[in-house]
Image (cartoon, rainbow, N blue to C red):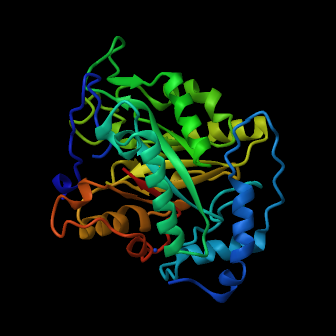
Amino acid sequence: MKNIFLSTLLMLSSLGLFSNCTQKPAAKAAAATAKTAATAGENAATAPGDTTTKVVYPPLDKKLYDSLMKRMAHGDTTGKWPVKNAPYPLPGAILPFKRVVAFYGNLYAKKMGILGELPPNEMLAKLKGEVKNWQKADPQTPVQPALHYIAVVASGNAGKDGKYRNRMPFKQIDSVLVLAKKAHAIVFLDVQVALSNIHAELPLLEKYLIMPQVHFGMDPEFSMKDGSLPGKKIGTYDAADVNYVSGYLAGLVKKYNLPPKILIVHRFTKKMLTNYQNIKLHPEIQLVIDMDGWGEPDLKEGTWRYFVHNEPVQFTGFKLFYKNDIKKAPHHMLTPEEVLKKKPYPMYIQYQ
């Protein structure tokens, strides 16, 4: 099974970069509040271009929030979903008012994901098409487009400091922000630390993370705490690492009066995230465990069941690979309607 879950290592161009890794509509109450949810979603994530403009969000409708969280559980009978004793988010929260649909990748590398594979305008048109597909599959949940950009990339080269990671230039991040504004999209900055660590890499992106439309992703696959080279084995993060990031981001939200940040933690094996039960939740943070594995539908179902459904944190995500998911029989990438059979409903969808 360990070998089945290992992601494929893709050698890329001159940068020596590695590619990353390698669900019945609910109760009548939720249906009755769908229109209100759509309005709340619009207020929650308009991705303003001028980050100096202060946006005042309406107070959180706790009754609506509770009904949408119950709907998100999708009839789960295990008692795991929705997660108990989770704090209410601050005003301006995106989840569960909207489902985020994101394109993932890096502008320097066509093999790292759809974000960098297609010319920008073609990529944005394709993203718009996927947003329509998800809106059709679940009309009750508005869709928020997103660009999920790998800002720190695990590398095949040691680099000057021997950390085997490349930090992308700010001018490239700036170009992603421009593309996102064209698509009314939010942005995720994703970090693959390799032989560095999240404490060193996260603060370097603060100038972007104080923007209300910018969120964060952390990838355990390339967190090589034992000194192994990235891509040789699957890395790991502990709850303590997640708590550091969520605490840091929560501090920014409070300091700059921001809406809650979404924090994505990728996962497709047990050891990628240790001591999940110790992860702390904050009103300022919406934490998503993203099922990041690729392969045939049955394999992805098993990964989802064991490492996402059975170890609940707060929200869930599901990743779809345009190429890797169709490599093996039945050569089929799951459709939105098929993904929406999951319990709970994934509220973050990522395409690579």
Residue 149 or residue 272, whichever sits in front = 149
Residue 83 appears in the picture as rendered: yes
* Up/down of 204 relative to 323, above or below: above
On screen, residue 36 above or below 226: below
Q: Is residue 311 above or below residue 106?
A: below
Q: Position of residue 25 (x, y in %)?
A: 55, 83
Residue drawn at x 71%, y 59% is 42
Task: Decide which of 310, 215 is in the foreground and name it.
Answer: 215
Number of residue marks = 0
x, y percentage for residue 190? 47, 38
Quadrant including the N terminus: bottom left
Residue occupying image coordinates x 21% and y 33%? 11
Place of residue 297 in the rendered image (x, y in percent of width and height, measured from the top left): 27, 68
Residue 4: quadrant of the picture = bottom left
Residue at image location 68% in from the left, 34% down from the top: 210
| Residue at x 50%, y 56% (from the top left corner) | 128
Position of residue 142 measured from the top left corner of the image (x, y, whole percent): 61, 66
Q: Residue furthest bottom?
A: 28
**In this rendering, position of residue 153 left or right of residue 210:** left
